[in-house]
Image (cartoon, rainbow, N blue to C red):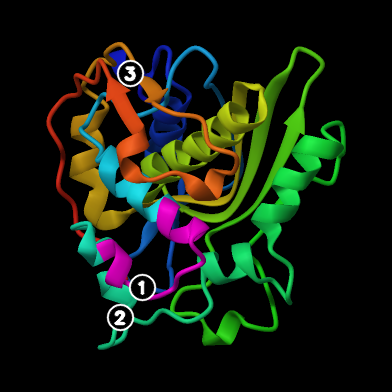
Amino acid sequence: MIQTMATLDDPYLDLLDLVQWGGEATQDRTGVGTKSLFGQRAVYDIHRRFPLLTTKKVSFKNIAVELLWFLRGETNTKFLKDHGVTIWDEWADKDGNLGPIYGKQWRDFGGVDQIVEIENQLKNDPTSRRIILSAWNPQELKQMALPPCHMMAQFSVRPNNKLECQLYQRSADMFLGVPYNIASYSLLTYMLAHTHGFLPGSLTHVIGDAHVYNNHKEQVKLQLTRESRPSPQLVIKRKCDSILDYNLEDFEIVGYDPHPAIPAPVAV
């Protein structure tokens, strides 16, 4: 593994470096090809910082709008486009439909509203080991434009009153997708903690197939030459009764001073 300045204190960059230089050459569904490692893990202390990458600019707006879209239970891109977000366009049909992806499963998994259930558990049984959000529904996978990559999250309230999240992701595009996934589930954890009287604790990210696409190699090399900068803070401006009541204007990122964005093609 090549040691670079950027990997000294950031779990994401350490894992990106490991996959880029230590991964095995593999073929994949897209035909692009990857360097890949299986069974990886990174832990982010989100109590002291919000893990929005600083070695390249990442759009918090895109992340927040997508999460709000999931929470609304929507599976058509209209809400995203109304907010200027196009990250799902490559997979949508001509009418913007994506099938029963994340939002459908979060809000109606066989008739169960998982978000309502999670909030009820945090209110009434916060020490439960069953506070789980799942997007992997085998009965509906074939109807989805893209089966869930981030497929399950478990939340745990610890004795120090911190809310922690462990995310399992079956497939992880380390350069383009994972920065969004880290920030998205951190935001979800912040929202739950803020709403229900806890402190955000940590995000543990467990990955099945962690990969760098072959057409991202140069971008990854560039990112790994950059030094990390101080991480920003997330401010939630009001407190709602439910995380379903928040909107984009309720969130503010403070002190974000990243390196410039690094464009790269999406493997569809």
Q: Quadrant of the N terminus?
A: top left
Bounds of the magenta segment: 68-80
Q: Quadrant of the C terminus?
A: bottom left
Q: Nearer the viewer, residue 207 or 73?
A: 73
Q: Which residue is mark 1?
A: 30
- Which amino acid does the dot numbered 2 rest on? Gly
**Residue at mark 2 to residue at mark 3: CA–CA distance:** 33 Å
Q: Which residue is mark 3?
A: 232
**Left-right relation of 148 to 62:** right
* Residue 216 location (% of width, % of height): 24, 50
CA neighbours of label 3 inside 10 A, class few (<14), some (14 to 19), many (20+): many
Residue 22 visible? The answer is no
Q: Secondary structure at mark 2?
A: loop
Dividing the picture into quadrants, the one containing residue 260 is top left
What residue lies at 49% left-to-right and 47% top-to-bottom?
245
**Residue at mark 2 to residue at mark 1: CA–CA distance:** 21 Å
* Residue 116 location (% of width, % of height): 69, 54
Residue depth check, mark 2 versus mark 1: number of the one nearer the observer: 2
Tell me if label 1 and label 3 are in contact, CB under 8 Å. no
Q: Nearer the viewer, residue 215 or 168?
A: 168
* Residue 145 location (% of width, % of height): 44, 79
**Left-right relation of 262 to 49:** left
Q: Which mark is residue 96?
A: 2
